[in-house]
Amino acid sequence: MTTATRAAVTGIGVIAPTGLGVDTFWTRTLTGGSALGPLTRLGANPYPVRVAGEVRDYVPADHVPSRLLPQTDRMTRFALTAADWAVRDAGLRPGTLAALDMGVITAASSGGFEFGQRELQHLWGQGPGHVSAYMSFAWFYAVNSGQISIRHDMRGPTGVFVTEQAGGLDAVAHARRKVRQGTPFVLTGGLDAPLSPYGIAAQLATGLLSRGDDPAAAYLPFHPDAAGYVPGEGGAILAVEDAAHARDRGARSYGEIAGYGAAFDPRPGSGRPANLARAIENALADAGLGPADIAVVFADAAAVPELDRAEAEAIAAVFGPHGVPVTAPKTATGRIYAGGAPLDLVTALLALRDGAAPPTPNVTAPAAAHRIDLVTGAPRPLTGHAALVVARGLGGFNSAMVVRAPHDDHPHAPEGRQTP
């Protein structure tokens, strides 16, 4: 038996409604500042969705080369920018690694909806000669991985996960798997930009979107007035690296991807319970940790009463009623499809670094029936070296991930599971 390779997070790039870049995003998240506001990207907005988490201060030409602008959707522009920032943050200089030693594994759920809708309108309104040649790939959910791979000449393991909100964790878990198998450096995470008419129509079909028009009350997970989630856009890219490789080149580590678990819910109407608790237990076992080792849980926070109840029951089943602080900073950004969980991972790593759990904006107190210790109002001091992030995707996907503070900060912590 040998100790598994540790996968360290050495770089982060963030595009979020609450800020561009790690520092701006974290400052606003820690103070509980909300970025929810009127949904403006639809113009006159004929839809019943009135509130969203929009990235309002992003100018594509400031961040993306002009030659790439005609061939990219807003989602991919976010991804390229976040990837650039993650590589720079990791301090990886060009030529340091061979192209085959670097991979790109991302998650996306909406695809390039805005680009695709525009070109379909050109097709039906003006004819096929007016459709961009870039339509062949710009709409595709795998385009972010491809464009990042090309831009940074990363030709190692490459892929994409499409499991809605859970996809952000699934992609990072696969990146860790590839690092453990010998790839020194992988960019991973997820970005989505689903606030186009086509993107909103797809979400409306689920029946889970909030139709409230007050940004302070439209998205209230675990609250008695919960009535659906607010959509958002953005996400994060993380540089995941062999910890020994990172140490040898003098890179800083935000922490470690320590454990991962996934489970699928049974068929609706089967009478069998949801499997989120199993995913959480698997993540803890993979990390070699127990419930008492977790300092804070970052919730999926659907704000749909039956989904909130199922998540609260799963958390209470593993940690005990009110057994661990729970927070949902995404009430400041909206739920961001595949981008939401990577943002939560970033937030968890920063919370461990600074010893503070950010609050759940706009939620004053959870419903008593949920039996969870929700962090509200102000940041809460944290003690401990590990955090849990939970994500669920439409269709029964459940994923959970444990992150741990940098290993050198706590030399007596468990080394993680042992593998052959």
Image (spheres, grey):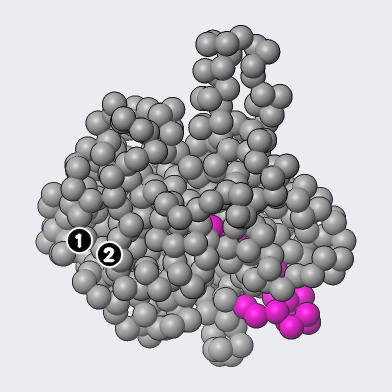
Q: What type is the residue that disc 1 sits on?
A: Val
In the figure, residue 152 lies in which quadrant? Answer: bottom right
Query: Where does the magenta region start and end?
Result: 236-253
Q: Nearer the viewer, residue 33 or 368?
A: 33
Q: Residues within 10 Å of mark 1 (few under 14, many from 20)?
A: many
Q: Classify 261 as above or below 297.
A: above
- Mark 2–mark 1 Cα distance, whole angstroms, equals 6 Å
Residue highlighted by disc 1: 363
Q: Position of residue 404 (x, y in %)?
A: 52, 75
**Left/right of residue 54 with respect to residue 134 in the rendered view:** left
Q: Residue, x 70% and y 49% (percent of image)? A: 65
- Label 1 residue SS: loop
Q: Position of residue 285 (x, y in %)?
A: 50, 67
**Left/right of residue 130 with respect to residue 192 in the rendered view:** right
Q: Nearer the viewer, residue 81 or 58?
A: 58
Residue highlighted by disc 2: 360
120 within the magenta span: no
Q: Is residue 85 visible?
A: yes
Q: What type is the residue that disc 2 sits on?
A: Thr
Q: Quadrant of the C terminus?
A: bottom right
Q: Quadrant of the N terminus?
A: bottom right
Q: Position of residue 154 (x, y in %)?
A: 79, 54
**Left/right of residue 201 with respect to residue 313 in the rendered view:** right
Q: Position of residue 75 (x, y in %)?
A: 55, 43
